[in-house]
Image (cartoon, rainbow, N blue to C red):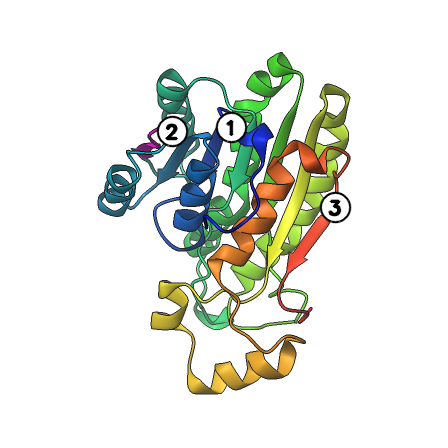
Amino acid sequence: MSSYARYPSLQDRGVLITGGATGIGETLVQAFAEQGAKVAFIDLAAEEGNALAARLAGSRHAPQFMAADLSNVESLRGAIAGLRERSGPFTVLLNNAANDKRHAVEETTPEFWDTSVAVNIKHQFFTAQAVLADMKAAGYGSIINFGSISWMLKQGGMPAYTASKAAVQGLTRCLARDFGPHKIRVNTLVPGWVMTEKQLKLWVTEETKVEIAKGQCIDAPLMPQHIASMALFLAADDSAMCTAQDFIVDGGWA
């Protein structure tokens, strides 16, 4: 990431990232740490999260990690409070955590549905609620909610995920209006099909690679670094008048 743009406004800024231990989240943690931000992140994957924090410990500010179940609001609130004690207040929030587990309509239980919604959108609202006081006190802030092009493409096979991700954009626009008077910006970063280790292991096949190549205008793999580059811009003061918007990074597919 060192060859990418530098954002002076991100240096020493408090950044909270959900789902930061692996995949896109891991790249976000690294990218913001390289900008000199005070990065804190939450994930259920304790081993991976601790390893990432240790690997980046030599950054200007050593990233702070706390393992927690984001689908449990009290656990989420406790983790945020604990990380705030270590890192200070947060003026950037990246609601990245999600789970795109495939499931058939006929086999979907109410419990599975509720768990999916909790991971994919419920935590986004309650994390934003938890950092609102920090941002109001600072007089500024940037919240980046992560969406998905899956519902735009009418992708089947995971209705709980696609319904939740469609709702993220409604949440963003509502919060942008409510938080705007406090100079807090709220945007949706909408990734396409990102080639993370998980996606390559579980879902990407030779057939889906053909589908991706056909769908994207740019026939090249969409990587976590592409998502992180947009996230840095939206978090920095360079995007000071961008709010209530969708920023799609998908190679031109949706």
Does the image show residue 19?
Answer: no
| Crowd around label 1: few <14 · some 14–19 · many ≥20 (10 Å) | some
Kind of element beneath mark 1:
loop
Between marks 1 and 2, how big is the CA–CA gap?
9 Å
Image coordinates of residue 55 in percent, x first then y, are 26, 42
Q: Which residue is mark 3?
A: 245
Q: Nearer the viewer, residue 13 or 90?
A: 13
Q: Nearer the viewer, residue 239 or 159?
A: 239
| Crowd around label 2: few <14 · some 14–19 · many ≥20 (10 Å) | some
Position above or below: 21 against 39? below
Image coordinates of residue 72 in percent, x first then y, are 40, 36
Is mark 1 in CB contact (under 8 Å) with mark 2? yes
Q: Which residue is mark 1?
A: 11
Q: What amino acid type should be assigned to the residue bearing mark 1?
A: Gln
Image coordinates of residue 18 in percent, x first then y, are 44, 40
* Quadrant (top left/top right/bottom left/bottom right) for the C terminus: bottom right
* Front tag of 3 and 2: 2
Q: What amino acid type should be assigned to the residue bearing mark 3?
A: Gln
Of the numbered discs 1 and 2, the one sitting upstream in the chain is: 1
Start-end of magenta stretch: 61-66
Kind of element beneath mark 3:
loop
Position above or below: 20 against 147? above
Of the numbered discs 1 and 3, the one sitting upstream in the chain is: 1
Q: What amino acid type should be assigned to the residue bearing mark 2?
A: Arg
Q: Which residue is mark 2?
A: 60
Between marks 3 and 2, how big is the CA–CA gap?
31 Å
Kind of element beneath mark 2:
loop
